[in-house]
Amino acid sequence: MAGPTETLEFQAETRQLLQLVIHSIYSNKDIFLRELISNASDALDKLRLESLTDPGLAVDSSELQITLETDSEARTLTVRDNGIGMTREEVVDLIGTIAKSGTASLLAKIKEAKDAEAAQSLIGQFGVGFYSAFMVADKVTLRTRRAGTEEGTAWESDGEGSYTVAQADGLPVGTSVTLHLKPADGEDGLGDYLAGWKIRQIVKQYSDFIRWPIRMAAEAATEDGAAPEPETLNSMKALWARPRSEVTEAEYHEFYQQISHDWQAPAQTIHMRAEGTFEYEALLFLPAHAPFDLFSRDTKRGVQLYVKRVFIMDDCEALMPNYLRFVKGVVDAHDLSLNVSREILQHDRQITAVRRRLVKKVLAALKSMRATDADGYAKLWEQFGRVIKEGLLEDRDNTDALLELVSADSTHDPEKTTTLREYVERMKDGQDTVYYLTGENRQTVENSPHMEAVTAKGYEVLILTDPVDEVWTDQIPAFDGHRFQSIAKGQVDLEGEADGSEEAKAEKAQREQDFAGLLGWLGTTLAEQVKEVRLSTRLTTSAACLVGDANDLTPTLEKMYRAMGQELPPVKRILELNPTHPLVVALHQAHRAEPEAPALGDIAELVHGSALLAEGGDLADPARFTRLLTDRLARTL
């Protein structure tokens, strides 16, 4: 060093802030190296830019790099760059003084922060990530010389109450930060930051895609005793920062495997860049198959977030909605703080805008895949369709786009699924309703009595078997102007739709008058099980079926709510009878002949129970139903 050494005291508020940085803010001490490497990368960026804009700046920018040096005997770790460097004034302004103003207000905000992440975000906005070095070091020495000057500066502090600044001659252009490391302490989260494996691990996790090479001296000499070439620790392969035309499919697949640990090729790759007030790049992947924990409550979701190629967090939920939790990838934002917290991200308007654009891009990619690769889309929908349909409940801004993606089984084709758009295109003349039926599986739905008249009259029915179908069909009223109608709920007047003649209406009215006595008696007899008994227009071969009112919960949805611990009042349903079925005709005649006959009550229970079983329901008292059934069978033999 040359020239006098000046010792300066930290202001009282600044000392408090520094202690918070060192002891309270960062839960993971390894990120000190991320902060120092990020600062070094910024210095290299600034030198490259200044060398292009200032022809008089005599610097060599051809070998810009970041070097990590360890000294086991002295227990030091040095992070060195040959970037822009700093003058003495910049050192005092940027390093020696944490802030020119606002320290008190910042300190108050940190103390009011609800958690460490929120406090860490405030620290990041304040620009003192450099001070995280004191988490792992007893003393930090910084030496720097700015490009275009001859005089260097040395700064040193133990992070307690003061720091020293002195002139240092003979320094190269750039900055070196030397950490005099504390002893490793696993209980306190202090790693062995002199160990090559530990340094490689941290660089790989946080700084692998920094555009400048991060080099470290090799740990062993060559066979002839010569000094080995330094080892480059980072890949520098930030594929998202390169034009798509310059990236091969093999590179995309390799990167996908690296971030997802999935050894199959992705089904779709989305590479995008946004410029303007908020710049970012994104590289997203749609997997070919679902992970085992897709529906686990504890599953991690969200894409990786980088800021200028520096890794920030692994599962950034703010960038991807829950129903797209299977999407893997990277978003690299240019204008965020390195220490931005999850809480801040949730309320950041720019991040919200990025999320909206990412979602639209993913949905557009799915739509394009459906149009150009039907087989591939069918396989992807089989894996993730149940999750994507959750978006119909969560994302009302994209309801129309999501409905266009819905693919479902239908009575049109026993092998292939159909989209809603294809269903509408095949509608019969005069049909304005999309018919559907929910159930546990295709076989149960196809064999349901509710299907009989609908399919007999040539109407196509969507077969919906995912639990989420019970919910979204209740909340989404229509598709492209065509309302959704469950054939197991409300009145399905197929006769009116097919034949609205006066003769048909008169015939229906006469039939209802004839059966009024039986319907009233059944309604009273089964009052604890059903709320109404009426004649059906949806049955052709079955004697009876159970339906719900238009706004009632379905039995499956009722079970789901009860399984989640929600107490619900019992939902009574409507018993519909087929007036042409031999059993109903015989019951009608028997009731008219002897309304008080004791056996009629047993038959009423059997009719209701058989209707419940036909749709896959559960009997309230299976033993009683079995006894009634065997007794009636015995009497017929």
Image: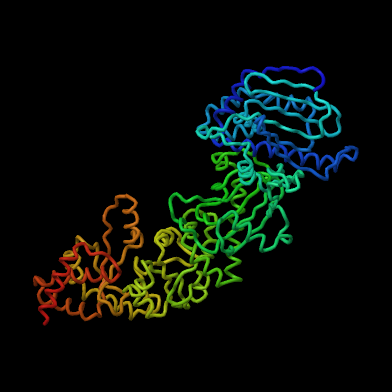
Give x and y (percent) for residue 506: 30, 78
Instruction: Residue lying at the far front in this picture: please name it.
Output: 224
- The one nearer the camera, 316 or 611, is 316
Looking at the image, residue 85 sits to the left or right of residue 609; the answer is right
Considering depth in this image, is 283 or 553 the residue closer to the camera? 283
Q: Could you tell me which residue is drawn at 77 percent across and 30 percent down?
A: 144
- Please say whether residue 79 is visible from this viewpoint: yes
Q: Is 482 or 611 nearer to us in this picture?
A: 611
Residue drawn at x 25%, y 80% as measured from the top left: 580
Where residue 490 sits, quadrant-wise, is bottom left
- Kindly tell me whether residue 127 is visible in this rendering: no
Up the image or down, 200 lies above or below 21; here it is below
At x 53% / y 35%, what residue is drawn?
Answer: 189
Image quadrant in which the N terminus is located: top right
Residue 513 appears at what percent x and percent y? 23, 74
| Residue 34: quadrant of the picture | top right
Against 106, residue 245 (above or below) is below
Q: Position of residue 474 (x, y in %)?
A: 41, 60
Quarter of the figure that contains the C terminus? bottom left
The quarter of the displayed image where residue 470 is located = bottom left
Residue 80 in picture, x, y percent from top left: 74, 36
The total number of labels drawn is 0
